[in-house]
Image (cartoon, helix red, strand yellow):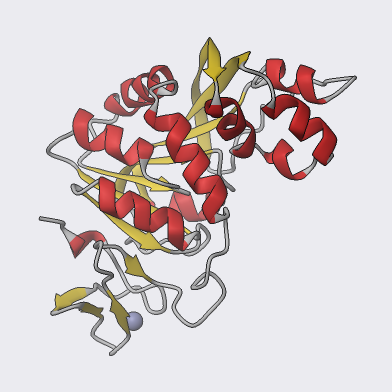
């Protein structure tokens, strides 16, 4: 059974209560629960259609992640989350729910929630991760009460530190996952004549202290159709000439680094 009791109304921050196929707050704001179990909290506004990632990109990422190549990263993120003994853990920009899935397995007694603006991704997440509650919501207006979460994760997604700070309890953990300098370098070598390293940020969000930086780096070989799927889940897919894309897609095998940087911050 999904537990919707952690959700609050994004308009007035009152608790949401389930009645039939909808959630209501005491001020009469009403949100429908979809057949797959997620709640759309941005109905009628931007995001109700399909903003955020495209459906194609979601499918490609779901395919690559389901192959298990991100398991090393998921394992390290769960280990850093464990230090905060989470009873309520949220994933901001949850995509198709791969992190939320790992959290429900690692912390079976915790409430796990995820938000994303892309409805197609949230639908996939809700269909596949039965133990978590997903909402179509903006990361700068999270549908959770003040000081309620023990851990908030933001992986490859826009970060709104003030909003994350609001929903975290004092001493709670903010785990930010960003691409490391060499992330997908092997792929970029195939795409560009002068590939570049990613820029990393050492910025500490206001109101947080930095606990640690953990790295998860390994080599990954995509084969056959997975080469195209890997390409399609990256931002380079939209920034590269059709000729260069076709050249990479024709590769039978592509080996590249996956390099992730996990920064752990503590709410002061
Ligand atoms: Zn309301």
x and y, in percent, of residue 55 in the image: 52, 55
Q: The N terminus lies in which quarter of the figure?
A: bottom left
x and y, in percent, of residue 103 in the image: 27, 35
> Which residue: 28% across, 90% down?
28
x and y, in percent, of residue 130 in the image: 20, 49
* Vertical placement of residue 145 versus 69, above or below: below
Task: Judge left or right: residue 52 versus residue 40.
Answer: right
> Which residue: 52% across, 15% down?
215
63, 47: nearer the viewer: 63
> Which residue: 28% across, 64% down?
7
196, 121: nearer the viewer: 121
Q: In which quarter of the image is ligand 1?
A: bottom left
Task: Judge left or right: residue 188 versus residue 110.
Answer: right
Task: Judge left or right: residue 61 versus residue 237.
Answer: left
* Vertical placement of residue 92 versus 5, above or below: above
Question: Please, which residue is most extreme toward the bottom here?
Answer: 28
């Amino acid at each position: 059974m999904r537990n919707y009791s952690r959700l609050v109304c994004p308009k007035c921050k009152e608790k949401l209560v389930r009645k039939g196929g909808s959630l209501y707050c005491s001020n009469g704001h009403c949100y429908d629960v979809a057949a797959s179990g997620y709640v759309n909290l941005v109905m009628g506004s931007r995001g109700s259609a399909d903003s955020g990632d495209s459906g194609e990109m979601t499918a490609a990422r779901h395919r690559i992640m389901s192959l298990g190549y991100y398991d090393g990263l998921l394992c390290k993120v769960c280990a850093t989350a464990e230090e905060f003994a989470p009873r309520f853990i949220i994933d901001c920009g949850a995509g198709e729910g791969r992190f939320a899935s790992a959290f429900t397995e690692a912390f079976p007694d915790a409430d796990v929630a995820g938000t994303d603006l892309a409805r197609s991704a949230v639908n996939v997440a809700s269909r596949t991760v039965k133990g978590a509650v997903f909402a179509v919501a903006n990361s700068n207006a999270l549908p959770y009460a003040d000081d309620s979460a023990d851990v908030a994760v933001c992986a490859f997604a826009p970060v709104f530190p003030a909003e994350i700070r609001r929903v975290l309890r004092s001493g709670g953990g903010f785990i930010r996952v960003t691409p490391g300098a060499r992330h997908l370098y092997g792929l970029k070598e195939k795409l560009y004549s002068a590939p570049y390293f990613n820029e990393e940020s050492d910025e500490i969000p206001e109101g947080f202290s930095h606990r640690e930086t953990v790295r998860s780096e390994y080599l990954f070989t995509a084969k056959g159709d997975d080469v195209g799927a890997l390409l399609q889940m990256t931002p380079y897919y939209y920034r590269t000439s059709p000729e260069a894309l076709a050249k990479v897609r024709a590769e039978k095998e592509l080996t590249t680094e996956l390099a992730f940087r996990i920064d752990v911050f503590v709410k002061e």
